[in-house]
Image (cartoon, rainbow, N blue to C red):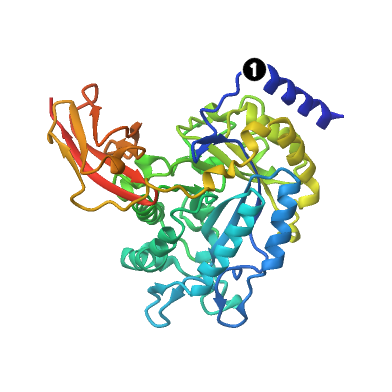
Amino acid sequence: MKKISVFFILFVFFSSATILSSQQLTFNGKSYFINGVNIPWNMYASDFGTNYLHGNLYDTTWFENAFTQFESYGINCARVWIHNDGNTSPTFDSTTKYITGLDPVVLSSMDDMFKRALKHHVMIIPSLWSFNMTNNDYALGVYGGMHADLIQDTSKTRSYINNALIPMVQHYANQCNLLAWEIINEPEWSMNVPNGGNQTQVVNANQMQCFVGMCTEAIHKNSTKMVTVGSATLRYNSDEFSVTSPCYGNYWKNSAIQSAYNKPLAFLDFYEIHYYDWMNGVISFDPYKSGCQESFWLLDKPTLIGESQGNSTKHSPSTMLYNAFTGNYAGVMFWSYSAGADSMGQFSEFKSALLAFRNAASTIVDFDTTACVTTTGINQPFKENSISIYPNPTSGVFHIQAVSHQLIANCQIQIYDMMGKCINQHIGTSSNFQIDLSSRANGVYLVRIISGANVVYRKISLAK
């Protein structure tokens, strides 16, 4: 009876009230509440790539069956593990442990996964690494875990970025159902932070923030896709501090990441937090509790509850969905479709709640695949000399000039301050587009111009 009443209330809410969309995730021009599920793996750490012991373990039929069920239950997004502990991908030099590239099977398997998800109207969040990349997983293979050096040594980080991450990001720059890249799942278990750092190897917070910053910068430079981090708990993703909710600070806000890697594109587009019942006690990090809506935690970006215990004894699945929506979170992704052996939830325990929510809120759940229709005329590549900005420096008003109307009209134009905050967004309307920064403080700003998968960056100096 409780489930029926919750979704009846939700139905009435949608029927009679203005739907808040400020904290939903905007993707392909539409705002979504994420009604999702985790697919951590079918074959642990080996779904994408050629495992040196077992070969290619990607299972087309398994993923097709998963996405078919997701469509049946109104699920609009899946979170999928890619490298995990590094056992199968990317490719390491056996002597130096620098990353040399990607086994071609990684991309061909991911291609198939994205294609099948799109057919069933499902968006994907690829989670690249997980905290066990610093654990001793050698029992699974010689590259299973123990990769703290990939985080600590920026030259090894750069080998990953140049030889694996950027090729992957560019390959999927126009993948219309790729919602966001997640750099790492629950990094705090690999970090020397209070109540964290429980893996075999531990890195300090600054090193992990630098690793995240370098990867986010690379993604932002090479695509228009969003980027996030799957924080283990609000304890590490909030500046709220009280007797009952003593958080350790937001390790993933712009200023925290950029204190370790001071680049304007080193930032997350939205936060992702996780919930399990151990977070609901005398000391609480529970986003679903009364009074603990998104604003309570002092969060300055849309926040997705990226893992939520599917068999919680504190909240029913329907209550979690309803409280997340009314609490102004960006969505819920239940744990899990395929890791039932960990006793944290199975698909059968939450699938009906997801369907009921979708039926009550289809306008903000259903993935609009019309954006996946190939368009022509606006995605031609930029050339280095095809765009100019003048006057530069400027006292306020400046122009973005293109050699052809086609290059600026319909392009997305974003202005960032040096802290990585997007302060203005525009859609170009002519080959000579005007922007006014006269209300802003003097300084240097970054102009990002996006046409399909093509991105141009320019700096503009404001001196009034």
* Residue located 64% across and 32% down the image: 363
Q: With respect to residue 244, does 109 lie above or below?
A: below
Q: Position of residue 227 (x, y in %)?
A: 45, 48
Going by the image, does 156 lie left or right of 371?
Answer: left
Q: Nearer the viewer, residue 284 or 349?
A: 349
Asked whether the viewer can see residue 81, the reply is yes
Task: Classify mark 1: residues with Cα within 10 Å, few (<14), some (14-19) or many (20+).
Answer: few
Read off the residue under disc 1: 17
Q: Position of residue 147 (x, y in %)?
A: 46, 69
* Residue located 55% across and 30% down the image: 294
Q: Position of residue 58 (x, y in %)?
A: 63, 71
* Residue located 32% across and 49% down the image: 455
**Residue that lies at the very extreme toward the right in this rendered image:** 1
Q: Secondary structure at mark 1?
A: loop
Going by the image, does 27 lie left or right of 323?
Answer: left
Q: With respect to residue 32, does 197 lie above or below?
A: below
Going by the image, does 90 lie left or right of 417?
Answer: right
Q: Quadrant of residue 50?
A: bottom right
Q: Nearer the viewer, residue 103 or 371?
A: 371
Residue type at mark 1? Ala
Q: Position of residue 369 (x, y in %)?
A: 58, 45
Asked whether the viewer can see residue 262, the reply is no
Q: With respect to residue 4, does 53 lie above or below?
A: below
* Residue located 70% across and 61% down the image: 64
Q: Quadrant of residue 157?
A: bottom left
- Which image quadrant: the C terminus? top left
Q: Nearer the viewer, residue 116 or 215?
A: 116
- Which image quadrant: the N terminus? top right
Going by the image, does 174 lie left or right of 68?
Answer: left
**Residue that lies at the very extreme toward the top in this rendered image:** 16
